[in-house]
C-alpha cells in the first residue's frame, strides 16, 4: 500500500523510499533506473515482464516527463497486460485502487 507520495519520496508499507521504485507483489526494488532516463524502454522492464503482471501501473513522474513510446504500450497490451500510465501521484492512487483486483506491478518515477 502506498500511503504517501511527494516529489522525490514515496512511502510504501510504512517504508520511505527516495529513489525510483518497482513495486512487485512480494517486494519493492528501490534501485530502478532506466537506460535513457526519461524515456522508458522495454529493457527497463525486463524483470517486470518476467513476473507476468496482469496490470502494469507506470508513474511518469511528478510532472509526467518520463515518456513511454507508443510501440511499447502496444507490445505490453498485446501480451495481455493492462497498462495504466499517469503522472506518479495519479499512478499511486490507481495502484492502491486496483491492487487487490489484479496481479499488479508498479514502476514509479519519483521526480520530474
Image (cartoon, rainbow, N blue to C red):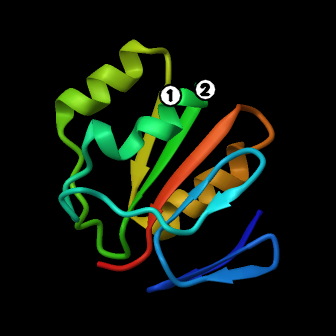
For disc 1, the marked residue is 82
Eyeballing the image, is 111 above or below 94? Answer: below
Measured from the top left, where is residue 65 in percent x and y? 23, 67
Q: CA distance from mark 1 to mark 2?
A: 6 Å
Residue 3 shown left or right of residue 63 in the figure? right
Between residue 14 and residue 83, name the one nearer to us. 14
Give whichever of 84, 31 is nearer the camera.
Answer: 31
Expressed as whole percent of the image width and height from the top left, the position of residue 35 reads: 23, 56
Left or right position of 38 against 109: left
98 lies left or right of 50:
right
In the rendered image, which quarter contains the N terminus?
Answer: bottom right
Across and down, in percent, residue 20 comes to 46, 70
Residue 39 sits in quarter? bottom left
The kind of secondary structure element at disc 2 is loop
The front one of 48 and 72 is 48
Q: Quadrant of residue 99?
A: top right
Residue drawn 50% across the image and 70% down it: 89
Q: Residues within 10 Å of mark 2 (few under 14, many from 20)?
A: some
Q: Which residue is mark 2?
A: 54
For label 1, the crowd category at 10 Å Cα-Cα, with few meaning under 14, some 14 to 19 and many 20 or more, is some
- Residue that appears at 40% across and 41% down: 45
Vertical position of residue 99 compared to residue 61: above or below:
above
Q: Quadrant of residue 103?
A: top right
Q: Quadrant of the C terminus?
A: bottom left
SS type, badge 1: strand
Q: Are marks 1 and 2 in contact (CB under 8 Å)?
A: yes
Image check: 101 left or right of 54?
A: right
Amino acid at each position: 500500500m502506498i500511503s504517501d507520495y511527494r516529489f522525490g519520496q514515496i512511502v510504501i508499507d510504512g517504508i520511505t523510499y527516495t529513489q525510483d521504485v518497482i513495486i512487485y507483489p512480494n517486494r519493492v526494488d528501490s534501485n530502478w533506473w532506466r537506460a535513457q532516463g526519461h524515456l522508458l524502454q522495454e529493457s527497463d522492464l525486463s524483470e517486470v515482464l518476467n513476473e507476468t503482471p496482469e496490470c502494469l501501473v507506470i508513474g511518469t513522474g511528478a510532472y509526467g516527463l518520463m515518456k513511454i513510446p507508443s510501440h511499447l504500450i502496444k507490445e505490453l497490451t498485446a501480451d495481455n497486460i493492462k497498462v495504466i500510465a499517469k503522472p506518479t501521484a495519479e499512478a499511486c492512487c490507481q495502484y492502491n485502487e486496483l491492487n487487490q483486483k489484479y496481479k499488479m506491478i508498479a514502476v514509479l518515477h519519483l521526480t520530474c
